[in-house]
Amino acid sequence: MEDYVAQSAAFESQLLSFLTEGVFQKFPALKLVLIESGVTWLPTLLWRTNKTWRGVRPEVPWIDRPPAELLREHVRLTLQPLDVPRGDPQRFARVLDHVGSDRMLLFSTDYPHWHFDGEDVLPDGLTDDTLRRFMIDNPLETYPRLRDGTVADHAVLRDNASASQEHVR
Amino acid sequence: MNVPFQHAGASQHLMIVDCDIHPAYRTPADLHPFLPARWREHMTTFGEHLRQGLSGQLAWPRMMAAGMRLDAFPEAGPPGSDLELMRRQHLDANGVEYGMLMQLSRGGMEERNLDFAAALSRAVNDWQLEEWVKPEPRLRAGIVVPQEDAAFAVSEIERRANDPAFVQILISPRASDPLGHRRYWPIYEAAQRCRRPIALHVQGYSGGHASTGSGWPTYYMQEHYATTTGMQNTVTSLVFEGVFERFPDLKVVLIEGGFTWVPSLCWRMDKHWQRMRKETPDLKRPPSEYVRDHCWFTTQPIEEPEVPAHLADVISWLGWDRVMFSTDYPHWDFDHPQQAFKFELSEEQKRKVFRDNAKALYGLT
């Protein structure tokens, strides 16, 4: 349990590494998806990297804008295991406000692992728009191949299948 | 830091408790009068033997004048070594009613020779008393002990237990093992018995382990952030190893490691505990309750959200009675009491954060 809790700290350290080593400048189209360690730790990281960067930017001059902007552009996080307590619909709304973007979070279930959250996987108090963002729009923007249909388009699959059958014949 | 404070004068009439002030030696020889001849000679001949390879220098560049406020250099010696300047520049100027001394270097926390560590610990505690608290009664010392030698640490804590100059016990949050391990329990037992909080100020080299779970940082910007993840892991260890269950009166102060991560960590611990609690049957309550009852947090370096009021949300989740103001004088990322908070605190919130929480915790009147 101690180790599982600490997974998010590992993500935090890795984000600092991506940031300070200039990975996002070298690969401006890179997207980074952090899977299965919750999301509520993110505001602290955005606030703190912004502030520390103002003090130490001569050390990392390639970071040419506030780190929070870079992170909002390049980083995505999956919701499960959702680290917001139940029973207060406002709580998650506040956290999302602190994150400063509804584009960063992606729906996930962790099926078939034993800490699968079932129907309890969504935070309380989500609006329909935000729900659609997490479940459809954000994933499609993160994985544009899905939207382009190169994988999911049935016509493409059918063509591929018949092509391979022809190849067999 | 770069945003002008919109409510200048907000705390001008309030005397404050500063929970993080760093005194300094003019030279290491300042400790000589407090060391037995055998260890004075050892210090002169061999120096320190720390748990990292860069003895006598910082492992990462600190930016800005070796990590110090440029205006805090006295005519001779390093910043923090001149009591007169500290009075004029900070204690008097900022209305400091009490200041908590954080003496981190040469106190034995990082020293590998444990006999030398014990001698250093005793010397540093005597030095704090003679050079700082006696001449300046606004200052309060911490009992600095080497956490890797719990037996000695207990004896040093007991030695100072009746002296009101010492209000807490300093050990390193980057110990050789996560601090929940039972090898450190005698220190917590002594702390509880002597009614002193354990103070964990970010510092140190983790017994040689990398400062992040993903390896050694390249840049100071990473290392600066690693204080935050390190404190999270420390709290997690204390909670899940059952330290607070075993020592119900133990209090822990986390200094300079941030505090906005606390609600998130508590939510995460509670969530996983509900699912996996069979692994830690000694825990009788949700992890967040132990943190709420046993942990206090200092403010510097304060978080500066893009929307300043977001910080108020977080403190309301954490508890306005658990956050204590600190400046980190004379270090480069010093927080000024009138500029640290970028949103308006109520009078009650100001009193709690800037003064009353610390006075209650440390039993100051």
Image (cartoon, rainbow, N blue to C red):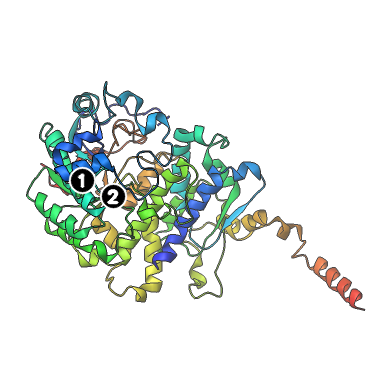
Q: Quadrant location of residue B41?
A: top left
Disc 2 and disc 1 in contact, CB within 8 angstroms: yes
**Residue B233 percent coordinates (x, y):** 37, 57
Q: Quadrant of the C terminus of chain A?
A: bottom right
**What residue appears at the point 26 percent right and 64 percent down from the top-left corner?**
B183
Q: Quadrant of the N terminus of chain A?
A: bottom left
Q: Where A110 falls versus B63 (above or below)? A: below
Residue B310 appears in view: yes
- Per the image, label 1 sits on a secondary structure element best described as helix
Amino acid type assigned to the residue bearing label 2 in the image: Glu
Q: Looking at the picture, does residue A107 appear above or below residue B172?
A: below
Marks 2 and 1, how far apart at CA: 9 Å
Circle 2 chain: B
Above or below, B36 relative to B7: below
In this picture, residue B59 sits left or right of residue B127: right
Between B299 and B6, which is closer to the camera in this rendering?
A: B299
- Residue, disc 1: B120
Q: Nearer the viewer, residue B21 or B153?
A: B153
The x, y position of residue B312, in whole percent, is: 35, 44
Q: Amino acid at mark 1?
A: Leu
Considering only order in the chain, which callout, 1 or 2, is on the residue closer to the N terminus?
2
Residue A83 appears anywhere in the view: no
Q: Which residue is the site of mark 2?
A: B111
